[in-house]
Image (spheres, rainbow, N blue to C red):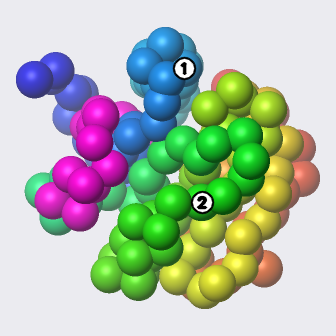
Amino acid sequence: MNSYPDVTPRASKIILANQPRLLRGMLKRALQRVPGLCVVEEIVDIANIPGAIERKSANWVIVSFPVNGEIPDAIHALLTAHPHIGVLAIATDGSQAKIMWKEPQIKEVNPSLNELIAILRQPVGNSTKHLDLRSHPVS
């Protein structure tokens, strides 16, 4: 198991469960350099996400979805079981991204690294209405 840095209380704790492995690795390296974001675990099988959320008290889970745009049913069930988390879904080819909360809303966003970081820096809310999707500089 990988070792992860200590998490400050205000850091956004992120579980990476996206595919392919190369994209997950690149995203992990980028996120580890951003103050206020902490990758607390990497998961290959989405069936292991609920346990990881409990163990790590994660705020965000990053998952994959196929290019056809269908979000796996397991992710919708995850949001019902863990309404306090946010899910950032990235297409396996990196061409699109979606954010989701416990509400049935799905918001498509620009999959640029700056945009994804801006999203992950914000507290998870009950609705995409609370998310500020304007450009935010990355420090």
- The residues colored magenta run 36-51
Which one is in front in this view, the residue at disc 2 or the one at disc 1? 2
Q: Amino acid at mark 1?
A: Leu
Q: Residues within 10 Å of mark 1 (few under 14, many from 20)?
A: some
Q: Is 77 situated above or below 139? A: below
Q: Residue at x 59, y 46 (%)?
A: 65
Residue 46's x, y, as percent?
A: 32, 50
Is residue 118 something that shows in the picture?
A: no
Q: Is 80 situated above or below 116? A: below
* SS assignment at label 2: loop
Q: Residue at x 78, y 65 (%)?
A: 107
Q: Is 87 situated above or below 115? A: below
Q: Which residue is mark 2?
A: 71
Residue 122's x, y, as percent?
A: 61, 58
Q: Quadrant of the C terminus?
A: top right
Residue 69's x, y, as percent?
A: 73, 52
- Residue 15 is labelled as none
Q: Quadrant of the N terminus?
A: top left
Determine whether label 2 and label 1 are within 8 Å by CB: no
Which residue is nearer to you in this view: 51 or 10?
Answer: 51
Q: Residue at x 89, y 53 (%)?
A: 134
The image quadrant that residue 49 belongs to is: bottom left
**Dot placed on the residue nearer the N-terminal end, 2 or 1:** 1
Q: Residues within 10 Å of mark 2 (few under 14, many from 20)?
A: some
The image quadrant that residue 16 belongs to is: top left
Which residue is nearer to you in this view: 29 or 70?
Answer: 70
Q: Which residue is mark 1?
A: 23
Is residue 110 something that shows in the picture?
A: yes
Q: Amino acid at mark 2?
A: Ile
| Structural distance between the alpha carbons of marks 2 and 1 | 18 Å
